[in-house]
């Protein structure tokens, strides 16, 4: 990946729907050259997909939290299966430190969060932080 590829990826992380012609104008290449580079970035797995990120600034009813989870080796697969099947789990990271995993969850209510915590705590210990707001939220840029 060269500097032109980085510029293209940077532009697409800001606006994944940016027209190829506009990208070409920003990096001083032709549209066919940009299309070819984007196809190669997709084939090489640098660009893994395109998505829509929805923000509901008026929605205050959901409870989002980060749950740090410590499970024994014999419970890891069961925890991962629970995380995979539970729609309230948005993301789950394998981490170093005192806990094995951190899960980002979005629940309808505190009661739903408590119910989810009870299920997870059958497999190991937890530490939970409720997300109050997100003052910085930017996509990864190369």
Image: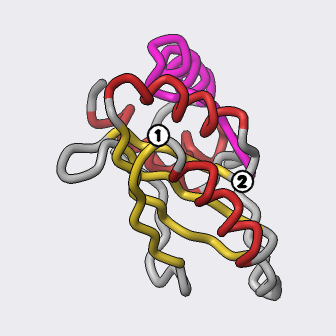
Q: Is residue 40 magenta?
A: yes
Near-viewer residue (75 or 50): 75
Q: Residue at x 49, y 70 (%)?
A: 137
Write down the quadrant of residue 129 in the picture.
bottom left
Dot 2 crowding, Cα within 10 Å, few <14, some 14–19, many 20+: some
Dot 1 crowding, Cα within 10 Å, few <14, some 14–19, many 20+: many
Instruction: Locate the C terminus by quadrant.
Output: top left
- Magenta region: 31-52
Q: x, y (%) of residue 102?
A: 41, 52
Indicate whether 112 appears above or below 41. Answer: below
Q: x, y (%) of residue 40?
A: 50, 14
Residue at mark 2: 88
Q: Residue at x 63, y 36 (%)?
A: 82
Disc 2 to disc 1, C-alpha distance: 34 Å
Q: x, y (%) of residue 72?
A: 33, 33
Near-viewer residue (84 or 3): 84
Q: Is residue 124 magenta?
A: no
Looking at the rendered structure, the secondary structure element under dot 1 is: helix
Near-viewer residue (78 or 16): 78
Q: Is residue 91 left or right of residue 67?
A: right
Residue at mark 1: 8
Circles 2 and 1: CB atoms closer than 8 Å: no
Q: Residue at x 60, y 39 (%)?
A: 83
């Amino acid at each position: 990946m060269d500097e032109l590829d980085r510029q293209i990826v940077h532009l697409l992380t800001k606006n994944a729907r940016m027209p190829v012609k506009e990208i070409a104008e920003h990096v001083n290449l032709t549209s066919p050259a940009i299309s070819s580079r984007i196809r190669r970035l997709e084939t090489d797995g640098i660009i893994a997909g395109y998505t829509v990120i929805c923000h509901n600034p008026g929605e205050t009813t959901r409870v989002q939290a980060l749950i740090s989870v410590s499970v024994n080796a014999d419970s890891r697969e069961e925890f991962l299966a629970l995380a995979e099947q539970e729609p309230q789990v948005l993301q789950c990271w394998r981490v170093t430190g005192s806990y094995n995993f951190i899960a980002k969850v979005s629940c309808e209510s505190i009661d739903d969060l408590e119910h989810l915590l009870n299920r997870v705590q059958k497999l190991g210990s937890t530490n939970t932080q409720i997300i109050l707001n997100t003052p910085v939220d930017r996509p990864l840029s190369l």
